Amino acid sequence: MKKKDQAPQHMLVARQPLTGSRKVYVPGTLHPQMRVAMREIALADTERKFDFGFPSESNPPVTVYDTSGPYTDPDIEIDLKKGLPRLREEWIRERGDVEQLPGTTSDYGQQRAADNGLDHLRFEHIAAPLRAKAGANVSQMHYAKQGLITPEMEYIAIRENQRFDELPADDPLRAQHRGHSFGARTPQGPITPEFVRQEVAAGRAVIPANINHPESEPMIIGRNFLVKINTNIGNSAITSSIEEEVDKAVWSCRWGGDTLMDLSTGKNIHETREWIIRNCPVPVGTVPLYQALEKVNGKAEDLTWELFRDTLIEQAEQGVDYFTIHAGVLLRYVPMTAKRVTGIVSRGGAIMAKWCLAHHQESFLYTHFEEICEIMKAYDVAFSLGDGLRPGSIADANDEAQFAELETLGELTKIAWAHDVQVMIEGPGHVPMHLIKENMDKQLKECHEAPFYTLGPLTTDIAPGYDHITSAIGAAMIGWFGTAMLCYVTPKEHLGLPNKQDVKDGVIAYKIAAHAADLAKGHPGAQYRDNALSKARFEFRWEDQFNLSLDPDTARDYHDETLPAEGAKVAHFCSMCGPHFCSMKITQEVRDYAAKQDLTANEVLARGMVEKSREFVAKGSELYL
Ligand code: IRN
Ligand code: FE2
């Protein structure tokens, strides 16, 4: 047996907290047994290096949203063969509307593993899956519409607030710009559990929370909340092992991935997914059509509704939280793509287009949509209605095929909502900047404000190797306009399967886009971290500047490349300008000097007092440490 196929029992996943950070837990009020995980970044005191008699002041820690799960809590033991602690299991059972199925989640998978001689890939502790009792609907939307605030909803409210609501009103770091939210109802005060409930009931937000994925920490996708990012991982037939995929999953959560899609298409699809779901602290999505296609050996025309249905149930029982379903690719839309530069670039879209043409029939995803809803509500799987006709090039952006499909997705949204099934809508693709806004406006209108979830969009086609950047530009814009979740793109897009470094680069690029959008929307609390980091930067608290950043390791490495000495971490300059040209150092000296003289800094500059400035220069050079 090849080494590659060995079970990842002793796999090394990143376990240590991010530097300067520790895990903190905030208890619930409605549900006091609940503990909401967050990350707290400790900061150093502000010390005045100039001898003007100013006292040092302390800087309280900054709390930030944390997607890394139990991996960054050194007190929690993790065994990848057993999976993560089952955080939501009790909440789910206490609702009294589920039953345990006979057998294990993965009778199918276990059998397949045995047949293929892959016994070592069997997951050790698979609980029997849960399903809604006959006639019950276990979706968060169903509960929300009934007026019920679930523990998941309270968890989310606390999590979104990031303890910002606990800060004193006069905390100077709370100062923020007003923001412009293009009609989103970005709350100005703290987010309440009741607000979460209302947004889910109205279909404006989605909580992906399959009852068979109790390991995941509740999160919300909606334009009145923090903008989220999705990461894609998954092996293909050609490369990558289970071990690498689980490692990438944990890695993407570490850097801020809010949800994760397993897009595996190769062998061992079921086993790979089992390992990922059991060890994943964020919701997991899939495109079930990929596995269905594997089952018919890649022949799209051999797909049937029955085979697809069984695949949905198999994955729902395993705990997949949302399904990309390309139900908007209708037979009559396929010819609209004929004159495109890049035709159909969606894998799922292309498979369905081929099926429709081969049978000259309407897509079974469309004709059986109500039956799909029945499956979704028995496990609380959310729809992510796929954009099978998204543009794959700048030339094809906003064309007839794309918008025809969007209209159909709006029609399907209404059907899903009638079943109390949660829905988000997938969007493009490749779109130049001036055509982006139209996408958001049309989506809100056609899809009745269901959350938009977009792939980028890439704002130009000419930078393969850098498509995390071409797309983060579009993602920041569309996030600002109201997109709820941004699907990351890695530097390997169009070129190959991403490795760990690509995953991290993609995540960070998208965290930047999402946060930039939160700032522009005026999301309460978003600017606090910028204020804290800028203060640290201005005060030459280098470690704090690193630790408050999205990627402390890279920030530190870059700094240390030129100034590796420990002493440089308190120095009042960096190698960019050197000691004598640091604008921030000079500004601080001006301020301190002025305060000493009882003048404002402006007055010092405006008066141009020759004598004073001579004295200042002389004194400054003496004072510099
Ligand atoms: C997101 C928005 N539009 C597409 N996506 C993602 O693309 C989707 O969530 C899934 O991860 C992947 C599906 O790709 P195909 O099958 O449409 O190419
Ligand atoms: Fe593309």
Image (cartoon, rainbow, N blue to C red):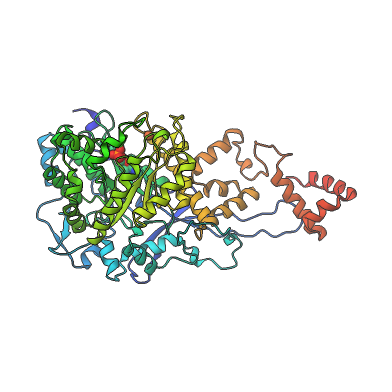
Can residue 118 be spotted in the picture? no
Can residue 270 be spotted in the picture? yes
Q: Residue at x 50, y 44 (%)?
A: 552
- Quarter of the image with the N terminus is top left
Residue at the extreme right of the image, as rendered: 611
Point out the quarter of the image occupied by ligand 1.
top left
Q: Residue at x 41, y 68 (%)?
A: 192
- Quarter of the image with the C terminus is top right
- Horizontal placement of 77 versus 544: left or right? left
Q: Position of residue 367 (x, y in %)?
A: 17, 48
Q: Would you identify the image quadrant in which residue 86 lies?
A: bottom left
Q: Residue at x 27, y 70 (%)?
A: 146
- Horizontal placement of 140 versus 98: left or right? right
Q: Residue at x 11, y 46 (%)?
A: 107
Q: Position of residue 150 (x, y in %)?
A: 30, 67
Q: How many marks?
A: 0
Closer to the camera in the image, 532 or 479: 479
Q: Position of residue 503 (x, y in %)?
A: 39, 38
- Horizontal placement of 298 versus 486: left or right? left
Closer to the camera in the image, 620 or 266: 266
Q: Position of residue 2 (x, y in %)?
A: 21, 27
